[in-house]
Amino acid sequence: MRTLMKIGIGVMALSVVAWLFVSTLRDTIAEPYDVDGSAFSGWTLVSRPPTPGELVGLGLRPPQRLSPGLFDELFARTMASLTTPGDALLPIVLSGELQGELGIVLPPDEMLAAARDAGLERVSLRPVCMAVKREPFMGRTREFFFLVVDAPELVAFRAQLSAMAAERGVADALTDPTFEFVLPVAGSDASFDTWWPLVVDRETDCQAPLG
């Protein structure tokens, strides 16, 4: 009987320790990320021709210090084996959206010039949260960590491009109401483009705010 009681107490103790560990880890992950607010202005526009396997057709490159800082904090919290994008860009227009007629009527150089005229390099983005998507893949779980931002100016610019495309015979382009502006931070593999089309549920995907 005493042996059974000792075993029961041991199991309970291990359960408490496990619960405390998971609770502490959850609290740590949910803590605000320490990011200087100045890192969300002065981003640089980048334009690329539509290419299979590429994510961004038109995007914004953050200041050099932002992505490494976010990754370091993320790794310290999760201790997971993750990879970073080779060139972290926030997509304004996806490369995949420019396949076909849209890429013909909206050439990269013209989109870039229009974006500069719209003042997108002077926009101050409003960070929402660090978020994560997970999905089962070949017996394991893929993960994609990304920064969600609010940017009414970018929404308006996509609408401007949509109107330009319609005038040139391509209707209903760039009108996806679920499109979110996100900066890829890290993933369990390097195939970041395969997460798009990306539908963000802020209630469930957001893990932590940015301080």
Image: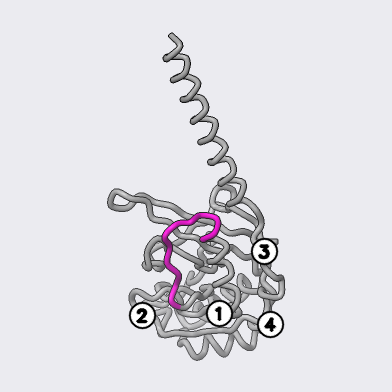
Which residue is nearer to you in this view: 14 or 139? 14
Q: Which residues are magenta?
A: 75-86
**Discs 3/4, front:** 3
Marked residue nearer the N-terminal end (1 or 2): 2
Marked residue nearer the N-terminal end (3 or 4): 3
**Discs 3/1, front:** 3
Measuring 43% from the left and 76% from the top, which residue is drawn there? 86
Q: Position of residue 123 (x, y in %)?
A: 68, 78
* In the depicted structure, whether residue 72 falls above or below residue 87: above
Residue 19 falls within the magenta-colored stretch = no
Marked residue nearer the N-terminal end (3 or 1): 3
**Discs 1/4, front:** 1
Kindly check if marks 1 and 4 are in contact, taking CB atoms under 8 A apart as contact: no
* Alpha carbon distance from label 1 to label 4: 13 Å
* Alpha carbon distance from label 3 to label 4: 23 Å
Q: Amino acid at mark 2?
A: Thr
For this orientation, the residue located farthest to the front is 2
Measuring 29% from the left and 48% from the top, which residue is drawn there? 139
For this orientation, the residue located farthest to the left is 138
For label 2, the residue is 51
Left/right of residue 129 with respect to residue 111 in the rendered view: right
Measuring 62% from the left and 46% from the top, which residue is drawn there? 27
Q: Amino acid at mark 4?
A: Arg
Element assignment for label 2: loop
* Alpha carbon distance from label 3 to label 1: 20 Å
Kindly check if marks 2 and 4 are in contact, taking CB atoms under 8 A apart as contact: no
Q: Check the picture and name the quadrant holding the C terminus.
A: bottom right
Which residue is nearer to you in this view: 11 or 23? 11
Q: Amino acid at mark 1?
A: Arg
* Alpha carbon distance from label 3 to label 2: 35 Å
Q: Residue 2 is drawn in which quadrant?
A: top left
Element assignment for label 4: helix
